[in-house]
Amino acid sequence: MVPNIVRGSRTYGLLAYLYGPGRRDEHVDPHLIASWDGYAPDPGRDPAANLKQLQTALDMRVDQRGSRRALKKHVWHCSLRTSPEDRPLSTEEWAEAARRVVAAVGIAAVGDPDGCRWVAVRHAENHIHIAATIVRGDLRKADIENDFPRAQAECRKIEKEWGLRRLNPGDGTAAKEPTNREKHKANRLERPDTSRQLLRDAVRKALAGAANEAEFFARLEKAGVLVNRKIGPSGDILGYSVAALGDLDASGKPVFFGGYRLAPDLTLPRIRQRLAAPLGERNDEDRQPPAAGRAGDRRSAPARARYHASTAVDEAIDVLDAEDDAAAAAIITDTGEVLDALAGTAMPAQKAQLLAAARAYERASRSHIRAANAGNRDMRSAARQILAGGYTTNKAPDATAAATLLAALLLLVIAGGRWHAERGHRQQAAAARAAADHLRAAYRQASARPMAALAQRGRQLPTAVRARQEQALRRAVPDGTARRLLAEPEFDALAAALAEAEAAGHDPQALLERARSWRELESADSATAVLTWRVRHLANLPVTRRPANRPATEGRVGTGSTPVTAAPISAPAAIPAPDAPRRR
């Protein structure tokens, strides 16, 4: 059961909406089901009653309080909605739910003769509306601070007692949802998203890997977002708001949203806190701009950036396994920046899934555990490099680099969701699971062609070459694990990667041992697929092609593959539910 609470100043206007046809004639048989005393007039089913009578009854104490003590917003409005899979509730059950909620939030406690006046109106099967005025019988304002979490807590109790779908409890970290008015406006203008959502995406992308506040604002303006800075008397920037081009109000002025109206972590103080953490510096190679690369490296700038990010992502998982919660929270926050950067530079085939993953994960990136400002922030540096590298392409080197990063990032998101679940952060764990589902889809799209090509090359390896790779695997991993990996269908691709690395002068066994040391293979549906991308990354293997009619020979790895049909690619498994034991 989901409560939604808003405040207002027009009692009659709210009642006219509740008893009216609705914006799209969706209100059917609006009628009163409960009230403060059980005797309120019902304009819906009582021919002798009208809206003015009900408004006068509700506003009686507001009027008695007088204009000198008038409240700016004296109307309290709460809708209660059940989930689609819930059973229909009877009129008596809805009335009981309304009485419990108004008591829980401080509108009208049980047995309080001075409780506020309220009514519950039903005009649909799956929800009701509660309208109340927040002046008590003693003419004091009702104590309704923290009304939303109190309403949520009562709804969780109702769900448990009545056998309804049990939702995760709120923790105050959710982003502001678009209003119905914003949604209707987007539909009317035939836009896929509301301005609030588009601006939230734009602010997050501008923040991803930004070095300082000036760069953050410059990125926003470059993206075509209208930025309004709030300047104090000292000349300092005290806050900011943003507006989408073409989004105007009735007077023709841009509709601005402050950072807090987008998300709790997008206020200027929170942004400054994140920017105070220095960008990580991995090594001399990674300090170079993505366009530079090492001598002889023919990888594109997007591919180099993604390979560098893959290393940072793999190493970040170790932080989640440590005892430092502040450092782990920083990694989880920075993971969101990498997702935002990927969503902004991806190919169209993966862009939709990556954008959905970034939007889902933004809830997982926030919790009440404060992220550390000091320490290793290589993930922020990785996000910066991805954006600097620019848009990726559908060429084989870029696809391989994308698959390598997505395989690593998927495991990190799974580990982050497990970290949240172990600490009872149900909302964040659920958000990470949703993000993982979208990442899994993006990974399959990115990896299908290169993995299928590698698999065919692995199947065409000479017997002696393949036997050497199998022996290297048996030496690099425990015997039981080796048998499981050899049985996985993706071993063909791993064998091809190892053979190519061997031809380039690498020791396959040493590569496998180092690839395994990057941790976190237990959550993968196919550990061999993850090892394949890690081996190719560690060996710095180029993506080459071999003519279809040229056979592979002993001791030499071919330079290409014949066209193949992509087989289904396995991906890491889902995040366990919060109560599930952790697999190690």
Image (cartoon, rainbow, N blue to C red):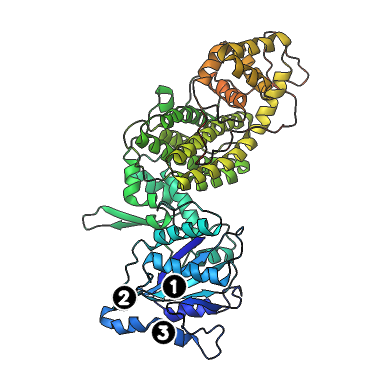
Residue at horizontal 28%, vertical 78%?
138
From the top left corner, tell me how far across and down residue 413 is, in percent. Answer: 50, 37
**Quarter occupied by residue 498:** top right
From the top left corner, tell me how far across and down residue 373 is, in percent. Answer: 32, 37
Circle 3 — which element? Answer: helix
- State how far apart marks 1 and 2 are (Cα): 27 Å
Q: Which residue is mark 1?
A: 251
Q: Which residue is mark 2?
A: 71
Residue 57: image tag: 3
**Residue type (three-letter) at the residue carrying disc 3:** Ala
Residue 25: image tag: none
User: Is residue 374 in view?
Assistant: yes
**For mark 1, does the 10 Å Cα neighbourhood hold few (<14), some (14 to 19), or many (20 or more) residues?**
few
- Of marks 1 and 3, the one in the foreground: 3
**Residue type (three-letter) at the residue carrying disc 2:** Leu
From the top left corner, tell me how far across and down residue 403 is, in percent. Answer: 59, 32
Residue at horizontal 43%, vertical 79%?
37
